[in-house]
Amino acid sequence: MPKGFASNKRIIIVAVCIFAIFCAVPVRLVQLHVTDHENRADKAGVARHKFDIEHSRRGDIVDAHGDILATSRTLVQIGIDPDAYERFFRVLRKNRKKRPDIIAKTTAEENAKWRELAGMLQISPAEIERICATYLRDSSFDAEEEAKDKACKSKRPDRVRFVKIHPGVNEDVYETISNLKIGSGLNATRIYERTYPHNQLAAHLIGFVNKEQKPITGVEASFDSYLRPYDGWRESEKDVRSRELVQFRSREVPAVDGYTVKLTIDSVVQKWAEEELAGIADKFTPAHAVIIVSDAQSGALLALANHPTFNLNEYNKAPAENLGNFAIQSYVAPGSTFKIVAASGALEDRLVTPDTRFDCSATSVEYRGRKVSLMTDDHRWDHPLSVSEIISHSSNRGAALLAIRLGDRRFHDYIRAFGFGSRTGFPLGGEIHGALNPVEKWYPIDITRIAAGYSIGATPLQIHYAMAAIANGGELVSPQIISEVRKPDGELAFQFGKEIRRRVISPGTAETMRALLQRVVSADGTAGKIALPGYQLAGKTGTAQKLVDGRHSKKNHIASFSGFFPASAPRVVITVIVDDANLPGGRAAYGGSVAAPSFRHLAEKLIPYLNIKPVPEARSSHLGSQTVIATNH
């Protein structure tokens, strides 16, 4: 007969089990809240922790009128969370047997959304599978596969939660993507991409940032401290769907956009200069060419154009040599444009007047105790030339005699004073000094060559601002390219203006030189064909033979013209330099025929654009007495 109650042994076993359970609970509580509390709290904190970066926008670069030259457009970078992607499809597979119809439909719909996304982004679904280290699966699933998934999950480290699958789409495309309502790990983040609306316009001035948004050249690099943005961030907690719980936001640093940098460059003038260079390139196929346009009084650059150039939006496709700024990174023999130095110095020191005459038929001259040969002129002179004629006819011998009258040390002082042999102060970096030997290293013959623009190397920008010193009344100014810097809210942060380096010649000497240079663009001058009646064009032509294999070549030339207008009250300075122009029949590329016409073309456009009024032609006057300076033959 069975007993009506449990045996003592069974009671003891049950009691022990109950006791063990009651003991395990507090032990586990102690473990959770005391022994392992810190570790688990850290894990929980990490799981809830949310750290978001708020990207900021790089500042714009604009021209003198506010036209945007460089800006940052908003893009949405598309990415995927591989873990969420895999987890989504794993859950579907696990529940297939419970709700096969619904699961099959959901899987097919999600796969269709990913295929549509892949088509919009022009990538293949297979690429998405590769990125996620998985593949779009159909409805097949079995226990063995589940076991593999569990094993892999237990062994794998924490996964990257964002993998980029497209560098960026615009807001309209992103809105279409959002409407797909993809629920399996699609992520997006807003970024800014640098773009240049005018492509190659002012490329060597603006510069560019690379794909990593690091500034490389130009304004982008030199004024990066103003343009550079500072990303913000916020730290908070998130829910199970990774959405921020705003009430738990602990720290936040707002993003700061970059400042706007305004240039002195005028996009219209820059465009004209580049179009003129394109015409020179088509006609003469030079190795290099440059056009510089500046305000005659302030030194502010209105345009600086180089040939060859490149597209800022495709800088990586351009040959390396196209990226260099020829105006500041290469030097040339200035040729006859350099004759303004000896003439200005001799006039300033009152050694000559515009009417002082020199015998330019001489082939040599006594200097420093020895006979020194003089360079040849393009013409034979049957009469002594005045200083005015030396400039208008571009006499090499006359320039040499002016320099000799100054003496090598005084001539060297004026060369330095006009800015040759030193940087101009161009604010974008990369500028070279040019080439000028110390006067102690000059040979007696050097003074006769340097006076005519040989045995010296000058950058196009040095040549330009030497001429500008005559145009503005005798002051050497630094190139100005930045007008102002403004904060993101539009408030003025910094303003830049005229920077005078030094006075080179007196206003009176500068006025005399302007009159002499105006004669160059008269009927008997070397640039007479470019005259514009009523507008007093003035300037100096230059033609220099290039050194080829250590010898001056009669086929390779530097053709140049540097000048200003109106001569009586200069508004604009323009310099055109063409390196190694090719003319039919191998003819010499003279500055008056290759470079000077472009000066006139630009002047014709600038006169109405800047509202420059015609000036009545001043009556010619002869200053000082006529003196003939004898030389040795």
Image (tube, rainbow, N blue to C red):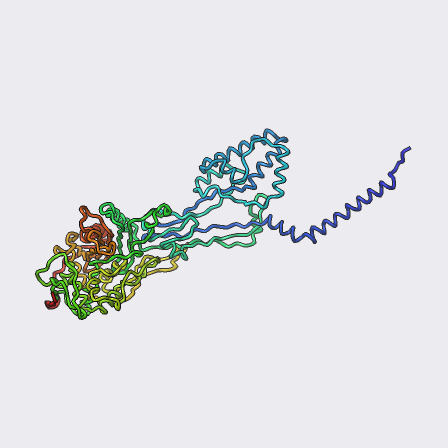
Residue, far top:
101
Is residue 385 visible in this depiction of the protein? no
At x 60% / y 34%, what residue is drawn?
Answer: 93
Is 511 situated above or below 140?
below
Relative vertical location of residue 147 with respect to residue 568 in this rendering, above or below: above
Question: Residue at left 18%, top 53%?
Answer: 592
Residue sitting at the far left: 382
In this image, 483 relative to 96: left or right? Answer: left
User: Residue 494 location, x and y as percent?
Assistant: 37, 60
Q: Can residue 567 be seen in this view?
A: yes
Of residues 134 and 268, the one drawn nearer to the viewer in this rendering:
134
Residue occupying the point 91% across, 32% down: 1
Look at the image and tell me in which quarter the C terminus lies: bottom left
Query: How far from the left and from the top, in percent, is residue 216?
Result: 39, 53
The image shows a total of numbered marks equal to 0
The image shows residue 565 at horizontal and vertical percentages of: 20, 57
Q: Where is residue 158 in the image (x, y as percent from the top left)?
A: 58, 46
- Is residue 460 or residue 395 the one in the foreground? 395
